[in-house]
Amino acid sequence: MGNSPERRTGSWRQFRPVLQPEKCTRCWLCFVWCPEAAITLDHDEYPVVDYDVSKGCLLCAHECPTHAFSVEQEG
């Protein structure tokens, strides 16, 4: 697990991954591949992105087989 939870790297991000739950099959690949542990699972085992920690690497969006993550530019 990375050390981002201690560093709050979310302010570095230019793009954010946004989960579209209707497309998610709960395969957990995003959870497994996240290098900073910015993705956790809720009580129904759906991924939840912690935007204070997510640095915007977008590995979750890249690895998702169902394209359940959209990519939005930070405003």
Image (cartoon, helix red, strand yellow):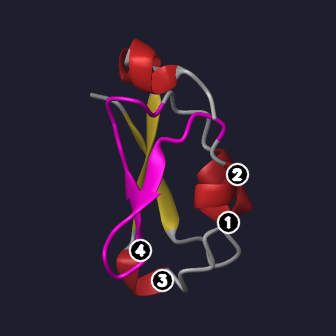
* Left or right: where 3 falls relative to 62: left
Residue 58 vertical placement versus 70 (above, below) = above
Q: Are marks 1 and 4 in contact (CB under 8 Å)?
A: no
Region in magenta: 35-54
As drawn, which residue projects farthest toward the left? 75
Element on which disc 1 rests: helix
From the image, give the main secondary structure of the stretch colored magenta: loop
- Give the amino acid at mark 3: Lys
> Which comes sooner in the sequence, label 2 or label 4?
2
In the rendered structure, does residue 46 fall within the stretch colored magenta?
yes
In front of the other: 49 or 3: 3
In the rendered structure, does residue 29 fall within the stretch colored magenta?
no
Mark sitting on residue 23: 3
> Which comes sooner in the sequence, label 1 or label 4?
1
Q: Are marks 2 and 4 in contact (CB under 8 Å)?
A: no
Residue 10 x %, y %: 39, 24
Question: From mark 2 to mark 4, how far is it between C-alphas?
Answer: 15 Å
Residue corresponding to mark 2: 33
Element on which disc 4 rests: loop
Q: Are marks 1 and 2 in contact (CB under 8 Å)?
A: yes
Residue 26 x %, y %: 53, 81
Q: Nearer the viewer, mark 3 or mark 4?
A: 4
Residue corresponding to mark 1: 29
Residue at point 55%, 86% (across, down)? 25
Residue 57 vertical placement versus 12 (above, below) = below
Mark sitting on residue 46: 4
Residue 3 vertical placement versus 63 (above, below) = above
- Give the amino acid at mark 1: Leu
- Give the amino acid at mark 2: Trp
